Amino acid sequence: MPDDQKKTIIIDYNKCVSCGICASICPHKALEMVNGYPEVTGTCKVCGLCAGSCITNAISMFATKFKDESILAEIAKGNIIACRRKSKEGTTLLCISRLDMIHIAEAIAKHGSVAIMSCGSDCRNFPGAIEAESKVKAMMIALEKLGLEKERISINEPSKAFSTPTMEIARLLTAVAKDRNVRALVAKMRSIVEDGNVYREKVNLEKYEQILSNAIDTAIKVEKILKVVEDEAKISAIAEKTGMKKEEILSTVIEMRRRGLVEVEGEDELAVRVVR
């Protein structure tokens, strides 16, 4: 892991899980996995696709303007997020590649809707615009699962007026945007659908979207459970507080235990304990 990272992106190796997604999606082949960790070994064009797609948010931009905290501060002022070649209004990004699902969630939480201005097929960091569309699609699915209109997100059209969601809905939408499994599926969309696995086995788009939909559903359930458990709670108490069925709580808790988020114990009735 280099101490002298180039002044284009910053990699937090304490957060990095060596998934290799950043290296695989870089449009300019600037990133390479070295000893299990990503390094900038080529010419980085600062498009930000790696930062907007990292499943643990371990990558940030060196330039302050394009760090998440700066982007979110700008989004608080208005609901337009744009490639600077497409529009000078709103929150302008060096490339729409930098778009993160977290940015979309924040815009909807603050304004009720968001307009994404993308250069589309004219993207200089191809396939950055396609990756942005994949993130939009995922967030549209999440909106519908949370009982909101997918039209709250528009691409290259003026935003529609919607009331802001409740704090609870906004929190769940943000949880989806941050979920590692959801982020991984979105980042791997093209490789899953177009390239296939090492055996050249491809997943058709319909099946991929179903897998993504299931992952989003799980992310929402995980967040609901984490909110009510606090330190420890029995399955019956979780069901009472969330309105979820015991069967879906149990299946979600099994997934949460696999991820190392909770521990489960008990005989007559299972108790769920959050791992700190």
Image (cartoon, rainbow, N blue to C red):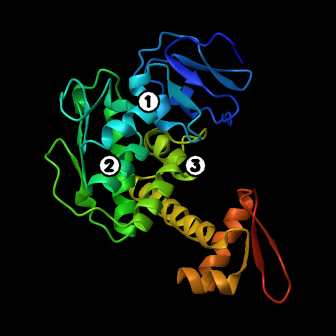
Q: In the rendered image, is residue 5 in sight?
A: yes
- Residue 20 lies, with reference to residue 164, above or below; the image says above
The residue located at (27%, 60%) in the rendering is 150
Rounded to the nearest whole Å, what is the CA distance between mark 1 and mark 2?
Answer: 19 Å
Q: Secondary structure at mark 3?
A: helix
**Image check: 27 left or right of 234?**
left
Query: Looking at the picture, which amino acid does disc 2 mark?
Result: Ala
Would you identify the image quadrant in which residue 194 lies? top left
Q: Position of residue 65 (x, y in %)?
A: 38, 24
Q: Secondary structure at mark 2?
A: helix
Q: Position of residue 80 (x, y in %)?
A: 23, 41
Q: Pick whichever of labels 1 and 3 is earlier in the sequence.
A: 1
Q: In the rendered image, is residue 210 in sight?
A: no
Label 1 sits on residue = 49
The residue located at (34%, 66%) in the rendering is 144
Label 3 sits on residue = 180
Would you identify the image quadrant in which residue 23 lies? top right
The residue located at (54%, 36%) in the rendering is 54
Nearer mark to the viewer, of 3 and 2 = 2
Quadrant assignment for the N terminus: top right
- Residue 186 lies, with reference to residue 41, above or below; the image says below
Label 2 sits on residue = 107
Rounded to the nearest whole Å, what is the CA distance between mark 3 and mark 2?
Answer: 20 Å
The residue located at (70%, 32%) in the rendering is 14
The reply to whether callout 3 and callout 2 are in contact (CB within 8 Å) is: no
**Image check: 254 left or right of 200?**
right
Q: Pick whichever of labels 3 and 2 is earlier in the sequence.
A: 2
Query: Looking at the picture, which amino acid does disc 1 mark?
Result: Leu
